Image: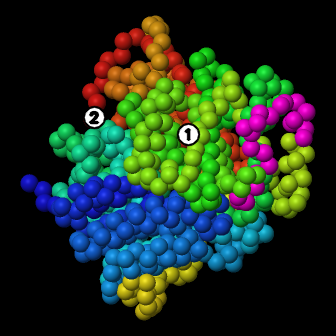
Amino acid sequence: MPNLIYRVVSVCGALGYGYPKESLEKACEGRIDAVISDAGSMDAGPYYLGTGTEYFERETVKTDFTHMVEAALAKQCPLILGSCGMAGGNRNLEWMLDVAKEVFTEQKVANAKVAVISGEIKNDLIIDAFRNRLLQPTGVGPSVTEEGLRESTIVGQMGIHPLITALEAGAQFILAGRSCDIALFACDMIRRGIDPGLAYHVGHVLECGALACDPGSPSDCLVAEIYDDASALFVAPNVGRRCTPYSIAAHSLYEESHPQLQFYPEGILCMEHTEFFAKGPRVAGIRNSIFARSAKPWPWSIKLEGAHLLGKRRVSLIYCDPRDVQKISADYLVYGRNGVEKTPADIPNEREVGIIIETRAQDQESAVLLASLLTHYLIHYGYSGRKATAGNIAYPLSPNLVSFKRADGSFGAVVPSGTRDPVFLKNYPMIKDNVLKLVQNEFPDALKNATYTITEADANNPAILVRTIDPDQTRCEARHKRELDELFKLITAKATSLCNLEAPDCYEWSLYHLLQDEKVIKEKLFPITFYRASGANWRAERSMMPKYSDIGVTDYAGNVNDRTLSLIAHTPPKGERLGMRPLLEMAVVIRSKDAGINRITLDIIFNSAEDYQTALRSNLFCKENVAPIIHIPTDRIVGTFFVDTCNAIKISIDRPIISASPDERDVFGAQQQAALEFLEVPIYAAPLVKASQL
């Protein structure tokens, strides 16, 4: 019988999503060696790095962190939090430290050793690397200039070594700047001698909380148990969720452009030979993942992210008569026509709906809070039969919310979003009702202090989003007014329209490259400061740089080329075509999601091995045939891949525009799968049922 050697809890997908306190308490009934959460991402756009602000509401972050501190104190184990304040820059980190000091005071934390690790990088270091050609692109990305670098806030994604150094020095609480989310979970396991391949794969499953469960949600906890036979088991503390080989294997694809290769600062996680297995009806496990220490650029490479100000921004949301839409240029974003994707919604039975949340209150904070809660619950709400598990709606703006003051003196907030997902739209009335119940139950004051309307904008009630960006405030206002004047010559705006709103400044990504200067990485990046903390009194004791060591196997003989491994070949089908079948009937998941700022990955996870083999046999999913289906040129497809371990197909593409660009329609890339949802798959001959590995 294998022996348990390590047990860790991931509290949620990102600090601020919220999670049931009861789930964490249930997890803590057994042994706990670490309480860990990611606190951020670049997914929400460059604004949060550029401004140093937080994506989530302070109260939700504080509540989530409070429960983590309570658990870490009760179990006397490390608490690790990375990418603090969303973007992980120094200002984001300071914001989180203020929250931590408040929580420490309320929880009467005394004489605690805290490590704070900076993820921000001095601009001159990166400018020197640029001049010395030590910045490697990560695909299609921002054009780098010295001027752009000098104006940017720049962070690097730290790997395991800064975190291990802090743990080895005795820190119980670690608050880190921008971090590789998997490293947050892998670091302590590797420090304790657990195989890196297992540690990194466990980290990838845990990094989004219970999203790897069935049903999945980032707003709940997930536990991993590591055993001395080099296996790991995943257990959901919430009895309403379960872990299955399918759910764990499927999550191993999530947000990655390749299904079996993941690239980290220290090497490559290789999952070609990973085994996924069941351990009862609610528990699943993994074994045989390998971590390879490969040739350059791994190791040592650090992924860099940079953001700088593009300009001031004005927006208008204009409701109009549906007959007016044909009068305006196709370049306009119109919910009901092309609000979610640039290609108009013209597939038979396809419907595009804009979901416009608008709130009203006597103070700005209340209006913003209610709008934020409604949209956060709406995008992540899980429901039976859900296919697009990465997010229910698409946001065109970063930040997604615009607050304003009305002529009557009241305050308002508006969040435009949209979807073409037929499964979501079928369930939308139920989802909307349940979202409102969740807000009422968990944040009753939010509904007491503000009112709301949710408008569905479609082909019969279209809404036009007009955006203007300019470095100069006065010029931005004038340009926006001129654009509205020209538009109003063609259409008549309804009284419910919101015109000429001052939106948050627009930022853009200026850097998304690998830094390949090993000396700078090891000697200059990720300084650690140790504090002795009692309540809000944090006394700095010392600082140090991370200590580095090589990890992973050096004799891995497998394929580590992400352009060739598991590639679907263009193989014309054989035999007679027997008919067609809707892909929606064949797949349990059809989702899209950003894989970084420059790629989108689409995952199709089939109901059975038979459906999976039928899809492969159709030859519909090679890059040459899938490109016209999803409306992109063939040369923008990174690859289409088969995944036998979970009966899945992955399609990875270069983004048409960098995430959160001025013309963005879907910042998270979470609603680009609609064309696949309406797809009919040709059936060729009766395929032999392949025994599923699951």
Q: Which residues are magenta?
A: 485-507
Q: What residue is rendered at 80% in x and 49% in y? A: 500
Whole-percent x, y for residue 190 in the image: 31, 68
Of all residues, the one furthest to the left in this rendering is 1
Q: Is residue 130 left or right of residue 453?
A: right
- Where residue 641 is drawn, which disc sits there? none
Q: Say whether residue 332 is left or right of residue 13.
A: right
Q: Secondary structure at mark 2?
A: loop
The quadrant of the picture occupied by the N terminus is bottom left
Horizontally, residue 220 falls left or right of residue 119, namely: left
Residue nearest the observer in this picture, 176 or 513: 176
Identify the disc placed on residue 393: 1
| Amino acid type, label 1 | Ile
Disc 1, SS: loop
Mark drawn on residue 693: 2
Asked which colour scheme the image uses, the reply is rainbow
Residue at the image point whose x is 53% and y is 21% from the top:
679
